[in-house]
Each structure stands twice: as structure tokens, then as C-alpha cells.
Image: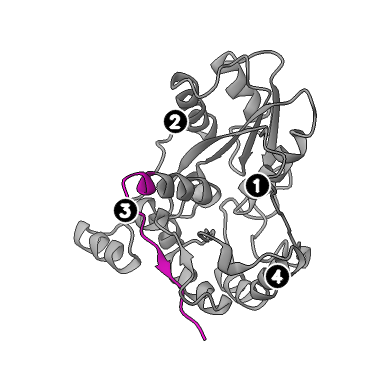
Amino acid sequence: MCGLTQTKFNLFQKTCNFSSHYIANENTFASDLAIEALDTLLKNDVLSKEELDVIFLATHTPDFFAPQTSSIIHKKLNLNKKTICIDTTAFCSGFLQTLMQAFLMLDNPNIHKIVILTSLVKSKKIDIKNDKISYLTHSDCACAILIEKSQDTSQKTFFSQNIYSQYALEETLPLNAYNTNFNEYLYINNGLFFDFASKNYPEFFDDFFEYFDIDKTQIANFFFHTPNEFFLQKMLENLCLNNFPCFHQVFRTYGDCKISNLPIELCLYKQNDKIGTASQKKGGGE
């Protein structure tokens, strides 16, 4: 626990408002977690191997530079040889970016079922001595999400994204790959990230609803990808989402799951909704 006594760690948990976090052991990697997630879908008859057309693996902690990690998953689960395997190097926005790619592929008349795998063992690339908070609030984890073609053609999905590449080497500092001139550990400039999101996201958020002509009051629930409770509260204040329903439990339950935050959030919402205990966080603002 990064040199903290149990008492100090319990105080840290209480202050940050999370109950647990999960760290993969030294012999467990992104493929192992992803295999467990996908195998759960298969064992519970959510889909069969023969039905699976595509698997996307979204991660920035692959087992190797080569071969691609989704091919390793394919091999170990003995998937159908016709199943397409695609790795995407993805960070926090990786789930939504991969979801967009999955929707585009479903336009192909021969593709009907796609599984998005989000898997991360970021703990192996965190500098525990100098970045204790990131390590203690992070959880290594994986999710498997089935996306399939709908027969209801009236359903619509909206996607928008802005890229600010001028900050590409500043917000996330370079992590060594074939270019070994930078960092052995992953560092995020959290101050830059927070300031940038606070200034730019509200305009992007409002433009999204205006462009697609969507009434915010008709949204049943908002889900935000945020690294912690503090960031979420500040974001809600900046967006002026006063009394808008916003479901947020993943951090309090598992800590920061990074690329898997939104999939887990949706699962928790579904589980709580079934037993009638879905809790919602109300946003403040003027």
C-alpha cells in the first residue's frame, strides 16, 4: 500500500470516497483480464463463438508490441477463424471511440455481433514511489460489451469529438516504446487536464446538444467519465446541470477504472435499476 499503514490507507479511502481498488499480480496482463471478461459472455450464453464477427480490444497496456493482444485472446479462447481481431491504442476516451468504430462496422451487411473489450493493467506502469495517489485509486480491470445490429431502424445514436493535439505530449507525457528517450512510467499532467476540461468541455457539451437539436431535459440519465468524485462535482458545476440526474458509482465502488469506467458505470446502473436502488447525483451550479 505504498508504505502506508492500514490506518492511514483507511483514512485515505474515506477522504477520497472509494471503498476498494484492484491490482493485477505480476503474472496477469491485459489479455488475461480480457479473456476472463469475454469468456464470461460465452459461458453465460450471451453469444456463441460462431456468432462473434469482430472483437475490438481497447487498451494502452498491451501484453506485447507484437503480436496484437486481441490475437492472443482469439488463440486462447479458440475463437472462430472468421472472427476479425482489432487492437486500438486507447486511453480514457477509448471506449467511446471504439464504440463509434463498432457502429460503423455494423453498417456492413455481413457483420452482426461485435464485442468491445476494454482491458488495462496500468498499475505496471505507475511510479509507485512518486505517484502514490494514482496507484492507490486505480483499478486494473477488463470489460466485455456486446454490440449487435438492431432491427429497430428508428433508433439513433449521436457522436461528436474534438481533438486538441497541441497537448498530445503535455497532458500525457511520452511513455517509452520503440522510442526509448522518454519515460518508463506513465505520467499524467492532472493540473493541465483539469484546467483544460474545465475551460473547454462546457462549450463542447452545449454545442453537442445544439447541433443535434436535443433537449437536455429529456435525457433520462447522464453518465460522465471522470477520474474521481471531486472532478465530477466540478464538472457538473461548470456544465450547470442543476438537478439533472447523473449516475455515478464506479469510483466509490472500484476506484478509477480508466478506460472501463463507462462500461462498469452502465452495468452498475442496470444492476441497481433492477433492484430499485439506483442512486443519482444531482449537479450544482447557477
Residue at image mark 3: 277
Residue at image mark 2: 27
Q: Looking at the image, which is closer to me, 228 or 32?
A: 228
Q: Earlier in the sequence, mark 4 or mark 3?
A: 4
Q: Is 146 above or below relative to 76? A: below
Residue at image mark 4: 204
Residue at image mark 1: 90
Q: Nearer the viewer, mark 1 or mark 2?
A: 1
Dividing the picture into quadrants, the one containing residue 51 is top right
User: Type of residue at label 3?
Assistant: Thr
The CA distance from mark 3 to mark 2 is: 37 Å
User: Type of residue at label 4?
Assistant: Phe
Q: Earlier in the sequence, mark 4 or mark 2?
A: 2
Q: Nearer the viewer, mark 3 or mark 1?
A: 3
Q: Which residues are magenta?
A: 271-286
Dividing the picture into quadrants, the one containing residue 225 is bottom right
The CA distance from mark 4 to mark 3 is: 32 Å
The reply to whether callout 4 and callout 2 are in contact (CB within 8 Å) is no
Position of 73 with respect to 45 (left or right) is: right
Count of number-bearing discs: 4
**Residue drawn where x is 64% and y is 67% of the image:** 215
Residue 217: numbered disc? none
The CA distance from mark 3 to mark 1 is: 33 Å
The reply to whether callout 4 and callout 1 are in contact (CB within 8 Å) is no
**Can residue 125 be seen here?**
no
